[in-house]
């Protein structure tokens, strides 16, 4: 009798890349080195968000003089870009990694199930602890990296935190309800980082450049997740 046909090769396990090599590579690093991977992602995307925040207002509010070169209005602040990237890399990403894992364990311990999970997570994150902490950290870190005193940073937080919170709730609660309901925990921070680029761009369009000064009193542009 003829020999039996060779057994079919086993299908590789799902690598999470969906057939895209970069996504598969990123997914493998996200699982094996979650914190460094999120730190690099955070630094890059916070930097992109700041570039958008600086460039969009100049392009959407060009000089009024006829014949003026639009690019001349872009007075790009490289130290500000560096501060944003450092914050995303060294502070926001590693702390947010802990936050999302803690929030997941808190939800499990609370016994929340079904559609209650995204509601519970969004409520805890936005109203109980995380948004207050992360926004205060952002404003304080930006001030310290600009050489402000602790008192100046405190004044900055006191001046802008409530307005930041109100804007955050309007934007981030719908985003996070979707994020918490459909996205695995290991990717939830990446959704936030990607959405933050859109968030920064929207703020840049809503507020003209003169309303976005970074000096002592803080600014509406600074409302970040």
Image (spheres, rainbow, N blue to C red):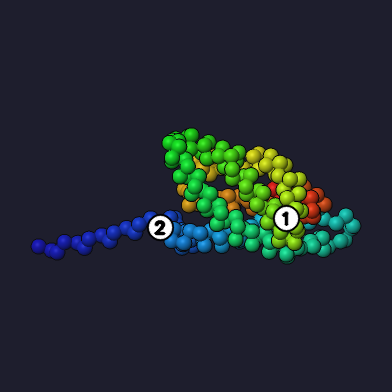
Q: Where is residue 144 in the image (x, y as percent from the top left)?
A: 71, 59
Image quadrant where one finds the N terminus:
bottom left
Q: Is mark 2 on a helix, strand or loop?
A: loop
Q: Which residue lies furthest to the front in this view?
A: 151
Quadrant housing residue 87: bottom right
Determine the residue positioned at 52% across, 52% down.
98
Identified at 45% across, 37% down, the residue is 110
- Residue indicated by mark 1: 150
Q: Can residue 137 be seen here?
A: yes
Q: In which quarter of the image is residue 89?
A: bottom right
- Of callouts 2 and 1, which one flags the residue occurring earlier in the amino acid sequence? 2
Mark 2–mark 1 distance (CA, rounded to whole Å):
46 Å
- Which residue occupies the foreground of this view, 5 or 88? 88
Disc 1 residue crowd, few under 14, some 14–19, many 20+, Cα 10 Å: few
Residue 218 horizontal/vertical position (percent): 76, 50
User: Can you tell which quarter of the image residue 13 is in?
Assistant: bottom left
Q: Which of 115 and 57 is in front in this view?
A: 115
List x then y, in percent, for residue 100: 51, 48
Taking the image as shown, residue 10 lies to the left or right of residue 90, namely left
Residue 159, horizontal then vertical, whole percent: 76, 45
Which residue position is annotated with label 2? 15
């Amino acid at each position: 009798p003829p020999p039996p046909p060779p057994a079919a090769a086993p299908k590789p396990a799902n690598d999470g890349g969906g057939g895209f090599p970069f996504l598969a590579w990123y997914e493998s690093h996200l699982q094996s080195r979650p914190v460094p991977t999120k730190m690099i992602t955070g630094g890059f995307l916070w930097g992109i968000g700041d570039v958008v925040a600086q460039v969009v207002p100049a392009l959407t509010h060009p000089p009024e003089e006829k014949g003026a070169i639009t690019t001349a209005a872009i007075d790009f602040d490289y130290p500000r870009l560096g501060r944003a990237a450092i914050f995303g890399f060294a502070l926001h990403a590693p702390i947010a990694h802990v936050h999302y894992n803690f929030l997941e364990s808190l939800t499990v311990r609370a016994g929340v199930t079904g559609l209650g999970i995204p509601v519970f997570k969004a409520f805890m994150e936005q109203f109980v602890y995380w948004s207050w902490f992360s926004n205060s950290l952002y404003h304080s870190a930006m001030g310290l990296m600009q050489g402000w005193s602790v008192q100046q940073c405190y004044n900055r937080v006191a001046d802008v935190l409530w307005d930041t919170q109100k804007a955050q709730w309007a934007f981030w609660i719908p985003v996070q309800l979707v994020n918490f309901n459909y996205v695995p925990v290991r990717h939830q921070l990446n959704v936030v980082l990607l959405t933050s680029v859109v968030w920064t761009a929207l703020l840049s369009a809503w507020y003209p450049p003169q309303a976005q000064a970074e000096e002592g009193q803080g600014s509406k542009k600074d409302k970040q997740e």
